[in-house]
Amino acid sequence: MRRSFIAFSVLTIVLACVEASAQSSACNRAQAIVDEVKTLYGSDKPDHKAILSKLRTAQQLCPTLGDAWKYAYCSALALGDEQNARIYKDRALFNNVSVLECASVAPQAAPLPSYVRQKYALVIGIGTFLDPDIPRLKFAAKDARDFADVLMHADYGNFPRENVALLTDERATRAAILSALQSLFLRAQEDDLVVIYVSSHGSPSRQEKGLEGIGHIVTYDTSLKNIYIDAIEYQDFAEKTSLIRARRKVAFLDTCFSGQASTRGAKLLTIEGVGVDDRTARLFLSGEGSFVITSSKSTERSWESEKIQNSYFTYFLIDAMKRAKEPPTIKEIFDHIAAKVADEVAKEKQAPQHPQMHPAADPSGVRIGVIPRASGQ
């Protein structure tokens, strides 16, 4: 019996050593991946999607390697993926990471200029459509005109009139919208501010038709039968916007799924509606100073109101810009919209509508109503 016990003990020790050795080998490979990631962080523009892919392998090899979770946290933040960033942060802290300052592992971005040299805006509102099968939106074009007016007002927006491109109804064709976006790309510089506003129907994702994609903006010349050819794909529109050089960019999206409107005043067509999803919204972002505010959650409709003669979202967006004594920050604008829209839609439509902001915080304090000026003035 004693010999059996000794033999069993020896076998247990040997197996434990083998397991520890295998784990050590796996963690060594994981550490090599993390070391590679550190070199990638040293480049001017780290590819955070590629970095996260590498780190997922490291995390699987060695779940206790804190740096694998730390760098994943920083890359998720850089991509605007706040939900996963929180998860990675918790795992990093659980695995004995004491410092989570991302500036220490990634190149420090230059601070935003203390001034705004010039301001540009592209304002789109489409309520009537060439295709009679697409339901009209009563106030979408008016929403766009009202928002453009407040942008150009000397007391609120301070945008030069010649720098505000307003496209409504028949002027808001697919070609015209993309041409205006290209003009912004060519004109705007790093120390400028750009505002994009869209009020229209949105289409469902191509997945609803057995294809791939994440939704489209319905333009004036979109055909309902060819919506995936004629409309502007959100992903393409967002990525083009993110490439505009201006470091301060704000997009306001007052759209949701399209189809045959089953309830009067709802911005959707035949698919039971959802708005712009978080993944799509984040495509508009390109670093500190860029924001996107959507009119509803991805599972909600956006509503128009006969009473106020606007969409709820646009009405309270304009109200937020007018009510402050000095130009409000993006966060202050959003907080006003979020509270007012939710309350009014619940009261008047007995429906949920909760605007969303990405990223949720605004440490840079971007204000779209500031007076443009050259450096040093």
Image: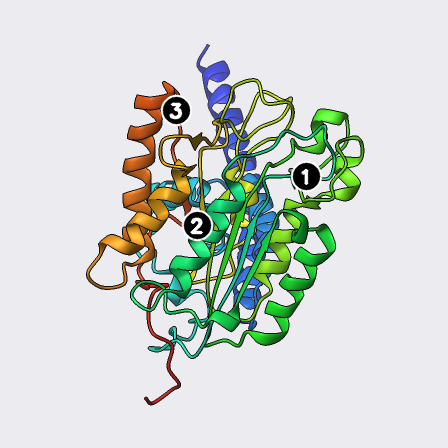
Which numbered marker is on residue 108?
none
Q: Residue furthest top?
A: 1
Q: Is residue 376 above or below residue 183?
A: below
Q: Is residue 67 visible?
A: no
Which numbered marker is on residue 73?
2
Q: Which residue is mark 1?
A: 129
Task: Tell me the quarter of the picture where residue 116 sits.
Answer: bottom left
Element class at badge 2: helix
User: Mark 3 against mark 1, which lies toward the viewer?
Assistant: 1
The one of 72 and 374 positioned closer to us in this rendering: 374
User: Mark 1 against mark 2, which lies toward the viewer?
Assistant: 1
Q: Which residue is mark 3?
A: 352
Q: Quadrant of the C terminus?
A: bottom left
CA gap, disc 2 and disc 3? 32 Å
For the point 32% across and 42% down, the residue is: 337
Give how far across and how far down residue 264 sits, in percent. 51, 22
Q: Residue furthest bottom?
A: 376
Determine contact: label 1, label 2, CB under 8 Å.
no
The one of 171 and 363 positioned closer to us in this rendering: 171
Q: Is 198 on the left-hand or right-hand side of 352?
A: right
